[in-house]
């Protein structure tokens, strides 16, 4: 692809290598002069490898403060900068056999098929019957007058005028050589050239048909226009050129392999690109006299048999359609393969719409749209294989990428992967974190044998590992440069202070550091704020732990993934929530809509970018910290993010661009222009229906007749970018707020019994953040009055009323009685229309009587985290979940029991004839298991919303007989469940008003388990239980792991004695004491035999699970008096 020229301030890697190879012939001084002449520091060139370590641009001190001048804009890379969106039978097309696509000036996209015409309105394809003769559509073309020419296979060619709806047909009866049309184009004079299966003919602007008399051009396959030249190809493989209505040149391809010309297009410089029936194209130069000069043969990498070529001056090249793929050939002769999975066969047509999206048609696979994606695929640009990325760092416009299998570097100027010094040391090594210090050195935290690896600015290499003096740990998670220049390195077992290449101080378990550090920042006062993997936040000063932030301070989760500086303090990203720490207090940011978050970046414009498993939430920083209701923008698949983020990763920022670590590579998105799409698109009323009668616009107004029935407004938002705008559609003057939705969730605006009068239909485009109006399209609507709404009818009715008082009085009484009856019937309706359960009023009536007369258990049942379903998957999915939830409740009660919906996601049930708590426990377990299964059935196995049920229960008449009082007690019990992890139940009893204790909750299923996984154990070590209770906890974990990512590991520890040593009770007590004291507070341990114990390690996975195990072994081995005794273990992840 042709790129805009740009001044390079450094030597290319090829020049650097050439200088290295020529070193034997050059003196040192001449070599230095050569480098200096190019503007590059000599010390920054690696003379032994093909890599430029740094450039004269200067070292980037931090990835977010780069002063590097951005390269000049270049043409897009279609493999990395565009997203492919497919359309087939699921989008309204009756068949995937599409022959042609086009766009008229009103914004609609048209698709021609063997079964007729389809029109796309930005939401769905709809079959349009323009004329009964239009069925087998082969070609479409939009001329300079915005007329749509439709070439059929057997009915000639039709000219459709979208504004008026008029259609003019041209067939053999009007003079066409054949009714089978294969190609259409228009010259500068407005003549329409029509290629038929017989001869080429011309339709003049006045509608007259004449055959082209050149040399009798037969069976035209393709036609295209450039300036005053028409270039075409026949089915026989002949290439011809027409100028000013006369044949300029005609030639056939001389090829012994039976290859022939198949399609052609020409640019405005006379360069002709001709696709062949093989896998290459030929480039010619057309002279004024019609002679052709062959310039080049361009191979298309196996993509063969050209069906169409389209020259695009904006993209400086040609789009091509072939039998086994599609792509782009730049004027620089570079090939881009644009074939997509599921769209690479029999590609027949292409055009570019008014928003610069490319639309391709396939005879077998439907329609494919290519739209500019705000998420740029860096790996695709650099042609790097997909891999999980953990950390990013930008230095001198080089992007360093730490992956699970090594460290690579990408030149952001050329989009090419480059080599660097000591590259082989990273082969196969898991790189967890990258950090650039103020001296220009790169610190790579790895899990390899070299541990912490340092790439010096001068090309040197140094490793800190288990062989380094005084070091703690050999597997490193991250590093931080302190204000005094020291490097603080976090390993799996502690912290290391590194100064001038030596470990000068450490903090380990002996110093009170009980678990691994995941994230670190240094405050303005020099203190270190460190998030840990299970013990909350450590405050460190002068190499000592001076304080901790944990549950007592309001931190609900002790796994702190990230500590992010923000206004007035820090955002703590934990395993299940966001918290705001001001240095004095910790506040849970419970207004944030999602729990499984990874990191937060605060942009210069004051926006918080929260990365998560659901995508990227963009929210105003002030609104986030105020913790009140606010709007947000979610960047997910609907906005072009067709991948997933890597958890616990380190992203990078360069200028206004955010580089994201993903599970398949790196994505780049602009922090300022992520929402900058082409908003100059058409918005139209596609259809107005009044009792199934189509209402057409007349003089700018939609006039609806006097009816009482259904009136339906369908809106077409003809936006084909990935912006997915927020819309509000409403009828001004009606008592209805209308519809607010995203473009891809649009539905019809429907009214019944709309009163007569003048209305205005508004289609507004709203800002997704503050809901301000960006654009407002208004259409006039008039509803005619019905007879009884007209003034004269009211006068006549009044006169008749005076004359017939008695009769009218009787009629009025009947009407009033009918109204009263209707109200009575409405009040007596007992069923919730969505779920089929009792509605709120009926539930209260039934339960008020039952609580007084029947023994039973009243249960309040709440669907946890339901709001996220609506936010992430839409209200249709929310309705499905509510209906299924009601079905689950119905399935676990008897016919004699009562169940109802109190509103929203709140339900109620009464189990008669029992006060046994185990009944509630079994129903809680059943409901929680079934709703998760159903959610995964509807939303996919990768669904991460923590759906479940919380139940508050109370017995009648034990705790009372008044329904309202019992309802309040059940609500109190429900609140207790919510506060203790959700997804469980609580039983209110007067004898135990505090409800459940810490140990009781363990035996009560998932609610207890959530407490353990939420690290709510108040002790400093593992939670120690007996073996029976451990079995109950294990069963609960087993159920939980089948439907959530529980991250639980089972470890069996065995204490072994050498020959002659006895395993006394005292030794075993010491062993269990070390075991329970060394493991984390969110682990569970129990003795299982004379010399064995089993531990359940929670919230841990992968290589991290060895950290607490190794710590147990090391603590036992280091303790005095344990000679002759050793600890062995076996482990298995659930």
Image: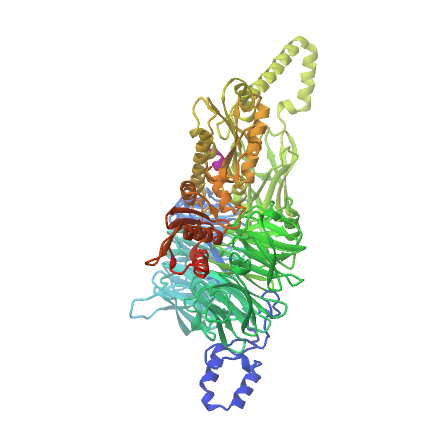
Does the magenta-highlighted stretch encompass residue 880? Answer: yes
Look at the magenta stretch and give its main secondary structure.
helix
Q: Is residue 1036 above or below residue 339?
A: above
Q: Is residue 171 above or below residue 486?
A: above
Does the magenta-highlighted stretch encompass residue 763? Answer: no
**Quadrant of residue 538 in the image?**
bottom right
Q: Which residues are magenta?
A: 879-883
- Give the camera-side residue of 1048 and 1090: 1090
**Quadrant of residue 960 in the image?**
top right
Check the image and name the residue furthest to the top: 806
Q: Is residue 76 visible?
A: no
Image point (47%, 61%), residue name: 389
Image coordinates of residue 99 in percent, x first then y, are: 40, 52
Q: Is residue 971 visible?
A: yes
Q: Is residue 355 above or below residue 287?
A: above
Image point (63%, 51%), residue name: 580
């Amino acid at each position: 692809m042709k790129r805009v020229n740009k001044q390079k301030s450094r030597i290319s890697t090829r020049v650097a290598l050439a200088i290295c190879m020529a070193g034997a012939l050059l003196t040192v001084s001449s070599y230095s002069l050569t480098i200096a002449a190019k503007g590059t520091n000599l010390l920054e060139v690696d003379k032994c490898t093909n890599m430029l370590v740094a450039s004269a641009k200067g070292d980037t001190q931090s990835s977010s403060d780069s002063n590097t001048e951005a390269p000049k804009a270049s043409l897009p890379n279609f493999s990395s900068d565009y997203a492919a969106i497919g359309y087939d039978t699921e989008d309204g097309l009756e068949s995937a056999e599409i022959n042609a696509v086009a766009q008229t000036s009103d914004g609609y996209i048209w698709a021609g098929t063997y079964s007729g015409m389809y029109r796309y309105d930005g939401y769905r394809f709809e079959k349009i019957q323009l004329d009964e003769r239009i069925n087998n559509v082969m070609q479409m073309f939009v001329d300079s007058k915005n007329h749509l020419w439709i070439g059929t296979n057997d009915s000639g060619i039709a000219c459709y005028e979208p504004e008026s709806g008029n259609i003019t047909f041209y067939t053999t009866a009007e003079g066409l050589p054949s009714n089978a049309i294969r190609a259409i184009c228009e010259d500068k004079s407005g003549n329409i050239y029509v290629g038929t299966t017989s001869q080429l003919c011309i339709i003049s602007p006045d509608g007259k048909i004449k055959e082209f008399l050149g040399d009798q051009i037969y069976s035209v396959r393709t036609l295209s226009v450039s300036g005053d030249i028409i270039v075409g190809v026949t089915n026989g493989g002949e290439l011809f050129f027409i100028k000013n209505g006369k044949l300029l040149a005609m030639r056939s391809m001389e090829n012994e392999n039976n290859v022939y010309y198949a399609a052609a297009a020409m640019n405005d410089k006379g360069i002709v690109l001709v696709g062949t029936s093989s896998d290459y194209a030929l480039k010619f130069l057309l002279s004024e006299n019609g002679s052709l000069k062959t310039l080049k043969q361009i191979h298309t990498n196996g993509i063969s048999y050209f069906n169409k070529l389209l020259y695009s001056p904006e993209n400086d090249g040609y789009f091509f359609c072939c039998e086994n793929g599609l792509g782009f050939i730049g004027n620089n002769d570079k090939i881009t393969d644009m074939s997509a999975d599921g769209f690479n066969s029999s590609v027949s047509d292409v055009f570019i719409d008014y928003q610069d999206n490319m639309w391709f048609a396939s005879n077998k696979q439907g329609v494919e749209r290519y739209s500019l994606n705000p998420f740029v695929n860096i790996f695709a640009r650099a042609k790097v294989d997909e891999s999980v990325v953990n950390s990013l760092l930008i230095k001198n416009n080089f992007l360093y990428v730490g992956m699970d299998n090594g460290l690579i570097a990408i030149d952001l100027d050329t989009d090419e992967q480059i080599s660097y010094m000591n590259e082989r040391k990273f082969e196969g090594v898991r790189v967890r974190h990258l950090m650039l210090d103020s001296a220009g050195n790169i610190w790579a935290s790895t899990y390899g044998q070299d541990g912490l690896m340092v790439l010096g600015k001068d090309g040197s290499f140094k490793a800190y590992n288990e062989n380094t003096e005084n070091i703690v740990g050999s597997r490193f998670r991250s590093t931080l440069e302190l204000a005094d220049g020291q490097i603080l390195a976090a390993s799996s077992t502690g912290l290391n202070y590194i100064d001038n290449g030596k470990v000068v101080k450490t903090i380990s378990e002996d110093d009170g550091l009980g678990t691994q550090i995941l994230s670190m920042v240094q405050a303005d006062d020099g203190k270190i704020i460190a998030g840990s993997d299970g013990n909350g936040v450590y405050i460190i000063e002068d190499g000592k732990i001076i304080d901790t932030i944990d549950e007592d301070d309001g931190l609900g989760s002790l796994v702190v993934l990230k500590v992010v500086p923000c206004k007035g303090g820090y955002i703590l990203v934990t395993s299940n929530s966001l918290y705001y720490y001001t240095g004095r207090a910790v506040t849970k940011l419970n207004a944030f809509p999602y729990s499984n978050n990874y990191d937060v970046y605060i942009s210069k414009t004051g926006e918080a970018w929260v990365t998560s498993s659901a995508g990227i939430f963009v929210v105003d920083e002030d609104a986030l910290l105020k913790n009140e209701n606010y709007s947000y923008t979610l960047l997910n698949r609907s906005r072009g993010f067709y991948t997933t983020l890597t958890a616990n990763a380190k992203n990078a920022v360069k200028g206004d661009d955010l580089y994201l670590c993903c599970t398949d590579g790196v994505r780049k998105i602009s922090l300022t222009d992520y929402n900058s799409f082409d908003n100059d698109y058409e918005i139209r009323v596609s259809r107005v229906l009044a009792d199934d009668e189509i209402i057409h616009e007349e003089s700018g107004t939609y006039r609806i007749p006097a009816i009482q029935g259904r009136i339906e407004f369908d809106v077409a938002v003809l936006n084909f970018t990935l912006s997915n705008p927020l819309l509000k559609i409403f009828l001004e003057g009606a008592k209805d707020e209308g519809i607010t939705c995203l473009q891809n969730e649009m539905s019809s605006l429907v009214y019944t019994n709309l009163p007569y009068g003048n209305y205005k239909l508004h289609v507004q485009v709203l800002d997704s953040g503050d809901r301000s109006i960006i654009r407002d399209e208004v259409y006039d609507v008039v509803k005619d009055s019905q007879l009884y709404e007209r003034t004269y009818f009211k006068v006549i009715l009044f006169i008749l009323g005076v004359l017939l008082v008695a009769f009218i009085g009787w009629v009025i009484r009947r009407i009033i009685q009918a109204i009263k009856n209707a109200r009575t019937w409405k009040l007596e309706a007992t069923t919730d229309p969505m779920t089929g359960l009792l509605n709120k009023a009926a539930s209260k009536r039934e339960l008020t009587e039952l609580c007084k007369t029947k023994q039973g258990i009243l249960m309040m049942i709440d669907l946890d985290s339901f709001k996220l379903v609506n936010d992430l998957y839409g209200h249709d999915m929310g309705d499905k979940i509510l209906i299924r939830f009601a079905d689950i409740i119905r399935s676990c009660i008897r016919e004699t029991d009562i169940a109802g919906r109190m509103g929203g996601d709140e339900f109620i049930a009464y189990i008669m004839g029992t006060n046994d708590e185990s009944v509630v426990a079994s129903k809680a377990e059943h409901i929680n298991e079934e709703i998760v299964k159903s959610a995964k059935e509807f939303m996919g196995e990768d669904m991460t919303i923590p759906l479940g049920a919380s139940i508050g229960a109370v017995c009648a008449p034990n705790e009372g007989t008044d329904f309202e009082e019992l309802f309040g007690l059940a609500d109190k019990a429900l609140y207790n469940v919510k506060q203790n992890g959700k997804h469980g139940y609580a039983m209110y009893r007067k004898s135990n008003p505090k409800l459940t204790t810490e140990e009781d909750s363990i035996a009560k299923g998932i609610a207890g388990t959530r407490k353990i996984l939420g690290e709510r154990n108040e002790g400093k070590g593992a939670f120690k239980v007996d073996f029976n209770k451990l079995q109950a906890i294990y069963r609960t974990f087993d159920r939980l792991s089948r439907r959530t990512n529980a991250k639980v590991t089972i470890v069996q520890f065995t204490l072994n004695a050498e020959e002659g040593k006895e395993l006394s009770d005292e030794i075993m007590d010491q062993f269990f004491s070390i075991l329970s004291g060394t493991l984390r507070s969110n682990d569970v341990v129990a003795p299982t035999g004379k010399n064995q114990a089993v531990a359940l390690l929670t919230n841990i996975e992968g290589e991290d699970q060895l950290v607490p195990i190794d710590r147990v072994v090391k603590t036992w081995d280091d303790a005095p008096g344990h000679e002759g005794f050793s600890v062995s273990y076996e482990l298995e992840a659930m």
